[in-house]
Image: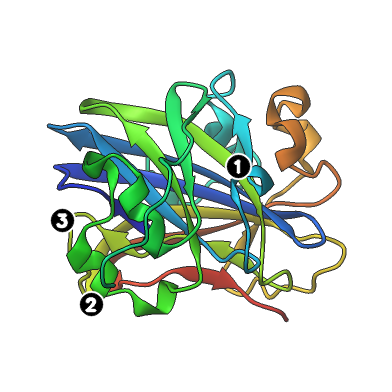
Amino acid sequence: MCCFSGSVDRVSATKIFARLLAPGRQGLVYQMSLKSRQDVAMILPLPVVPGTQGEAIHWVDLSQYPQFFSDLDRGFPVSKSDSRKDWGVPPAGAALPVVEVGNFEASFVPSLADFHRLDERFRLSDVAQDDLPEYLGWAFAVFKLKAGDRKIHPMAFSFPTASPRRLFFPTLHVHDGKVHDFAEFDHALYAQPHPTQELSFLAWTESDLLPPSFMDQALSKELLSLDHHVYRRSLHGRLENEDTWVRSA
């Protein structure tokens, strides 16, 4: 779910990488181009283990590796299709902590009911919350973004996942405070399997080589496995507005 706390003019060239870093812990890397006339927050849902609190989220600073996704693309064969890409009154609670992650301020929101603990400008709208009952029990990562027209450097973190047998990609759109049945997608998804998983990569393209031939090992930090191929899938055009999973084979 790529949600924004307010209306944005344009979101494009979204890229998301997902990998199970260790049994029970998933990593996510997220990048996009954004045009907004106001400061907004990007809100990503997390299918966390029940009871997860902020200290269980590991924020990863990729500000020194803005080319993370362009390097990932170097691992794939070039094809013709690539040419088009370049509830009630909430209980009282203390304000949620804000951490610096590269060029961003980020916060962890343990549940929908905890959004009131954020600055009002960066909350998920009440309308969107009412339209998303399936996210009760989920947590959220919130990144505060400045107004302007720019490409955002990769945002990265890991979390204790409630679904360790599959990989989660937050692709449901909320760009105007409402949840629509269909949305315009401009996404490239990237995934790596973990030895404990047997995942189905039908409709995905496999990288030609292993990551050491096209990625910077040091700058990738713990997010990338150097011993497994990367898989890529494109989502383009008007599609059902929903999150994406790589499921068990």
Dot 3 amino acid type: Asp
Is disc 3 in contact with disc 2, using a CB cutoff of under 8 Å? no
Q: Is residue 234 left or right of residue 223?
A: left
Dot 2 amino acid type: Asp
Image height check: is 2 above or below 212?
A: below
Q: Which residue is mark 3?
A: 176
Q: Position of residue 134 (x, y in %)?
A: 41, 79
Q: Position of residue 131 (x, y in %)?
A: 25, 75
Q: CA distance from mark 3 to mark 2?
A: 13 Å
Q: Position of residue 209 (x, y in %)?
A: 76, 44
Q: Residue at x 62, y 54 (%)?
A: 18
Of pointers 3 and 1, the one earlier in the residue sequence: 1
Residue furthest to the front in view is 92
- Helix, strand or loop at disc 3? loop
Q: Which residue is mark 2?
A: 181
Front-lying residue, 39 or 244:
39
Dot 1 amino acid type: Phe
